[in-house]
Structures are given as structure tokens and as C-alpha cells.
Image (spheres, rainbow, N blue to C red):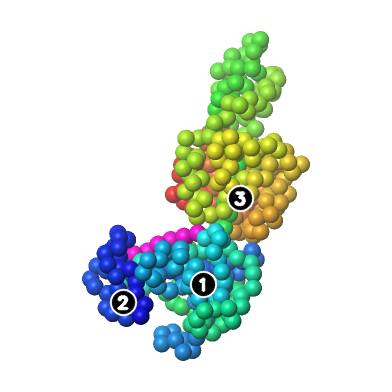
Amino acid sequence: MEIWDLYNENRQIIGEHVRGAELPDGGYHLVVHVWIRDSRGRYLIAQRSPSRASFPLIWEAVGGSVLKGESSLRGALREVMEEVGIDLSGRRGTLVFSEVGRSFNGRKFNDILDVWLFEYDGAVELQKALTDEVADAKWLYREDISDLCRKGVFMNTQYYFFERIADRPQWIFFDIGSTLVDEAACMEARYAESTENTPVLPSELKAKTEELAAACDQPYKAALAFFGLQKAKWRAELERPYPETAAVLAELAQKYRLGVIANQPPELRQRLADWDMEKYFDLVIASGAEGVEKPDAEIFRRALRRAGCAPESAVMVGDRLDNDILPATRLGMRTVWVRQGLASRRADSDIPDRTVASIAEITKIL
């Protein structure tokens, strides 16, 4: 006899329920769907046994009902082990979305659905499965699963796969300066130093830089040339993360793998640690360590290779159209332009896929 926890719509346990009995009004049981993706971008799907009472021989993601006393994650791990014999314990899983009382084709389900995504490269040996619920399992690309849908042999309640799983990015890569880190104080120091002992005022250099920023990729350099001034040293010690940066990274790290692609010195990872940001990143690519810098496409290719991620499954977030957005777009990555710092003065552009006014808005679109 299988017993489930009984929940209300606020996900609070209000009792228990025996499988097969009718759920009471306002009562829900917890269900998990578990999608498993390998580094080639394929997804593991399972074919229901011909002896199953419902939907025999239909293909679907692994999943089932969570048992009494289990967490959603623990139930997901158990279902995977039972159905396809894979032990995912210790691996990073992402709760992609949850839905209470979902509806499909006019039918309302009295369940709370949690959809999980795990990354896994390894063998699938059905003989290790603990139940006979699955007749076959195989790795398929998005297009192959689409073919199964057209043939009517894929579970119709899992059609959310295309929009919310397959088309969902795997990795989010960030630039650093004026994207995650505020450089305003650094620029003020530059304006002061470049104009020291000259007839030009710091405010005049700043105004010209901001004026040129409306259409120029390197406005400070262009402003220096306009006044005949010398470039000042960059004062990295004045950089500070934007107030919203930590909260944004913490939220995104629960849903995606995060990385950095930046024109920064070799010790970038330590600098991120000093800002208490390093813990959020699985991969840090700094130009000073790589010997190649943006906008060279090679630094983006290296990041994608080391992430094991196809360009179309990655998003580049940055403030500069020339360094961040354009090269990433040409490689096939999705892009988000953050109009912070001098970039806030640039005219609208149709190059990026999405545009936000600040790093705080990133979580609203990803």
C-alpha cells in the first residue's frame, strides 16, 4: 500500500492519503517529473511497460508520486533509481518549475507538480532498475522527441518540455565591469587623473565621455583624443558589486549553471571570492589567464567547450555591444544587454535578444 502526504494548495501537509483513494476537495499530492540531460544536449526518456494500466508503451520523462515523508528531491532521486537504475544522489539537480493544480486539455489534476532537471553522462542499465515500470529507455535530442509527439507516442501532459526544458538555457555567462560590478567610482578617478595639471576640468571630460557614449564603443578613449589627454590608470580597488548583484546571482544559481567571460586579470576568481561572489560560478574565464580577450570569439568558444554547452543553450549577459553582445550573437548564443554605466547612454539596438536597464531585472526574464 502506497501512502502519500496530503497537501493544501499552499504546499502545507494536512494529512496523509492512500494511493487509489479519491483525493478530498482542496487536497493535493506531490508529483515529480525528472528530466535527465547529457553533455551532448540529449534527454533520457523512458517507455512505459506494456503491462502498465495507463498509457502502456508511451514515452515520457521519469517520474511519479512522492511518498509520505519524502521531500520532492528525495522522491525524484528514488523514482529515477527505481525506473531506470541511475543513482543521481550527489549530483546537482535544478527545480525548473512547480505547478499547483495543473490543468491540461480541460482536465484539472489534484497534484503539485515539481519538474526537475539533472545533468548526467553515463550508462543507462535497465537491469539495475528496482521496478519493471519501464520497458525501454534512450537518449534523444529535442527534434527526436518532437517526432515522437507527432506520432502520438509521447506523454501529452509533458509537452511543456519544449518551452520550459529544451528551450531553456543551460548556462548563463556574465561580463564583470558595469554588468555585475559598478565602475562609476573608477571612472570618476580617471576623469580627475586625466585632467590633472591641464586646462580641462574633470566634469568636462566626463560630459564629453557621456556624450560620445551614445554612439561610441570606447567613449573615454574618444574623449581623451578630443581633448588631447592621456589615459589614466584603472583603479580596480574602487570597483564595487552593484547592490542587487548577490541576490540576482543567488537566485539564478538555483536554476542555471553560471559562468564568467570577462576581460579581467588572471586573479579574477580571487577577486570574485573577495566580493563573496565566487561561490555562484561554476566556470570563470578571464582574458588575463587565457591570453585572448573579447571581442575575439575564441574566448567565448573556450568557455563553451569547458562548459560542455552548445552556443544555443547559453546566454551572454553584458553591458558592451562590441565586446559582449555582438561576438556572442555571431556564435549563436542568446544575449542580454544590460544598459548600466556608460552603456545606459547608448541608443537602442536590435542586436541583443533582450535588453534590461539594470542587473536587477535579469531574474524577470531568465
**Which residue of the protein is positioned furthest toward the left in this rendering?**
25
Magenta part of the protein: which range?
A: 94-101
Number of marks present in the image shown: 3
Query: Disc 3 designates what residue?
Result: 282
Q: Please determine whether, in this image, residue 74 is positioned above or below residue 265.
A: below
How far apart in space, not on screen, are marks 3 and 1 (Cα)?
Answer: 25 Å
Crowding at label 1, few (<14), some or many (≥20) Cα neighbours within 10 Å?
A: many
Where residue 199 appears, x then y in whole percent?
Answer: 63, 10
- Identified at 39% across, 71% down, the residue is 67
Q: Nearer the viewer, residue 283 or 13?
A: 13
Q: Identify the residue under disc 1.
A: 80
Distance in Å between CA atoms under marks 2 and 3: 42 Å
At which x and y percent is residue 25?
23, 71
Q: Secondary structure at mark 1?
A: helix
Label 2 to label 1, Cα distance in Å? 22 Å
As for residue 181 lying within the magenta part, the answer is: no
Q: Which of marks 1 and 3 precedes in the sequence?
A: 1
Residue flagged by tag 2: what amino acid is it? Val
Can the viewer see residue 352? Answer: no
Q: Mark 1: which amino acid?
A: Val
**Left or right placement of residue 13 versus residue 188 in this view:** left
Q: Which mark is residue 1?
A: none
